[in-house]
Amino acid sequence: TKDDLILDFGCAKGFSVKALLNLGYRCVGTDISEYAISQAPEEVKDKINLYNGENSLNNLLLLENQNLFNFILAKDVFEHIEYEDINALLELLSSKSEYIFCAIPLAENGKYIVPEYEEDITHIIREDMEWWKSTFEKSKLRVVHFSYEFKGVKENWRHYPKGNGFFILESKINV
């Protein structure tokens, strides 16, 4: 609903935050890039912050006078996290939200199915759908829905039928 609070985790320059706010949703964002945050449109600068762990999330929740995010969006984020850090990050997000939607490039045998994804030197995790499902479960998240397609998102890569994974996750902590 329009009363739900959405976090764009990995918001970059805040364009999705701006779009959701313009549509009447409550939305905030956080990103690890100081440059990206500095380039955000003026009208969202008070709704986004530089990610530095749990404090960033708590500050955004305080800003909105809320205890949890109803939804977290994480599009093309988790593949940039170090293997040794992914579980802790997912557990943190699980503790701060009800649901998470994520879009993740998928791999087979250590290589992305979409070859162009190999060109991004910041991509770290190269795993298949089953690995991600297992990782989510270990991190107190239940996979509510999975698909290789999500209308309107990453449609330019549809010619690689299993190149992307779209997950809707529910927190086992906050249900």
Image (cartoon, rainbow, N blue to C red):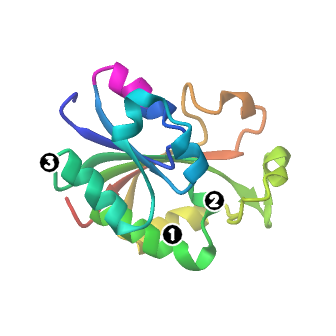
Q: Quadrant of the C terminus?
A: bottom left
User: Secondary structure beneath disc 1?
Assistant: helix
Label 3 sits on a secondary structure element that is: loop
Which mark is on residue 79? 2
Residue 86 badge: none
Q: In the orientation shown, which residue stands out farthest toward the top?
A: 23
Q: Tell which tag, 1 or 3, sits nearer the viewer.
A: 3
Q: Earlier in the sequence, mark 1 or mark 2?
A: 2
Q: What numbered label is drawn on residue 65?
A: 3
Write the residue at 54% across / 38% down: 13
The numbered mark, 1 or 3, whose residue comes first in the sequence reads 3
Give residue 77's position: percent from left, percent from top. Answer: 57, 53
Identify residue type, mark 2: Glu
- Quarter of the image with the N terminus is top left
Say which residue label 1 marks.
134
Can you give x and y, in whole percent of width and height, for residue 83 in the image? 62, 75
Amino acid tagged 1: Ser
